[in-house]
Amino acid sequence: MPRVAIIMPQLGESIAEATVIRILATAGSQVIADQEVMEVETNKATMGVTALCSGVLEEWRVSEGTSYAVGTLLGIVVATDEEIERTGVDTLESLEKQRAISADAMEIKPNDAEQNLHFAVDGEGYVESAPQVRPNVKGLAVPAGTMGAHYISPRMRARMDEMGLREADLSAVVGSGAGGRVTVEDLEKFLDYIQTWPSSNASPMRLAVADAMRRSWTRPLATVGRYVTLDAALSHRKQQENKPGLTLYLLRAFALALKEMPEVAGFLIGSKVVHPRSFDIGVAVAVDDGVVVPVVRKVDQKSLAELVEEYNDLVDRSRRRRLTEADTRGGIATVTNFGTFGLAWATPIPLPNETLILGIGSGVKKPVWNEQRGTFLPATEADLELTFDHRVVDGGGAGLLLRRIVELLQNPALLWARLPQPAFRFCRFCDRFRCKTVYLAGWIDVWFCWYSQLLLPTRKNFTLIAIYARSLPSTARRVMVEWKRLEIFLWSIVIKL
């Protein structure tokens, strides 16, 4: 009786092989046409392999958990002559005859070989043997292997694991297998080919950075940017005895802005966005052959003056490779100052466990229009770039965060002192509106805090507000006069109590 082959079909345009995950019909059982007799898994989906005609399943030539190339003989179905005539499928015998005829046509006779010496190959030449069974499921042709390792078989992955290689390491390898599949032989030939090239061993630091960037790049990352004027921060820095670096100003502004918009620094877990419970932000520090990111804890709760010593200690221990594991864990975002390398802009990549990274470029003197004077004045400007996980926040939310960071950098007094939250809200209100309505807002804020016992009207708090008032225009300064009157009134209440 005629026999019909069950072969591994062409399951997709770029699918070169599939793995058998479940055999649904046993040998000796009766099958019908188009019945699923096996389930196979590709790198994209799980699909079923069907019988081409009705008959008895004679044998399986494959096993579960093993991968097979497209066109591989999987099993044999014994059918009747009537069923073969009804379905019109090719029998195994007819396929073998076709293959024999093709082989005879390709065979080179001795006389022909003598006449074609220019095209003759020696015994070491590479000849790819024809497949035993050709696919009879018509579809799109598998593209030639011109795109490198776009598909890797499980056998290939096992070999790569043995050699400590990853998919990105095979980007330069062009496969010779079906559909451009990179085989183990291709890998071995490529490694032998580059064996004579000059090379050096990658340091553990470089390997750690490579692994982190590879894992981080699996997410949809986007970058937005805007310029910021640094004259206010630079002028404020000159007035301080213990001068903080510009990166520290950026770190503090980043933390305060994230505290106002914590959802931007969230992390997508399943169907939930997990918000940060502490604003611990890392700082990228360049070291030999890599980058380390120590984490500064609770940046929003510390003044810029308090952060100087902690920041300098972390940077010093980073460059001496004396950081502990606890110093680099738990960050929600990162700040990087690539302007120290003379770069005007960049697109930094966040760590895999973070969704944000804020970078600043080098400062450049530019003419900037001054609304008060009605003319262009020289100012130091730099580009701010924020890279974010687009699954968590959109470009609009990232833009609002950048705008708030710019506002804080242009008012460095807010960053230097650790203002109580009500006083900080007053300063922010004063900074945004700069009008006499701040007087009414100040009354409401102070009385609310007084009765809720959140803020005692101490001289220290009013002194901090007065420090901030020096950086405001004259309108805000007049508001501070009203605050001084309010201070006298409140202290009189305290004395009476």
Image (spheres, rainbow, N blue to C red):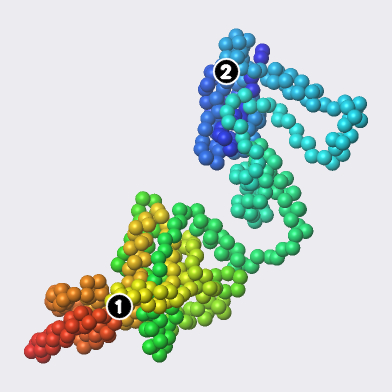
Describe residue 386's horizontal placement relative to residue 60 as left or right: left
Judged from this view, the residue extending furthest toward the left is: 496
Where, quadrant-wise, is the N terminus in this rendering?
Answer: top right
- According to the picture, the residue beneath numbered tag 1 turns out to be 373
Residue type at mark 2 is Cys
Residue at 63% over, 33% down: 70
In the image, is residue 64 above or below residue 374? above
Residue type at mark 1 is Arg
Q: Position of residue 225 (x, y in %)?
A: 42, 63
**Quarter holding residue 417:** bottom left
In the image, is residue 480 above or below residue 267? below
Q: Position of residue 124 (x, y in %)?
A: 84, 41
Pick the residue in front: 71 or 435: 435
Pick the residue in front: 493 or 242: 242
In the image, is residue 386 above or below residue 296? above
Residue at 36% over, 75% down: 376
Pick the residue in front: 230 or 454: 230
For marks 2 and 1, the one nearer the N-term is 2
Mark in front: 2 vs 1: 1
Labels in figure, total: 2
Q: Secondary structure at mark 2?
A: loop
Label ID, residue 108: none
Observer able to see residue 291: yes
- According to the picture, the residue beneath numbered tag 2 turns out to be 53
**Quarter holding residue 379:** bottom left
Residue at 73% over, 53% down: 191
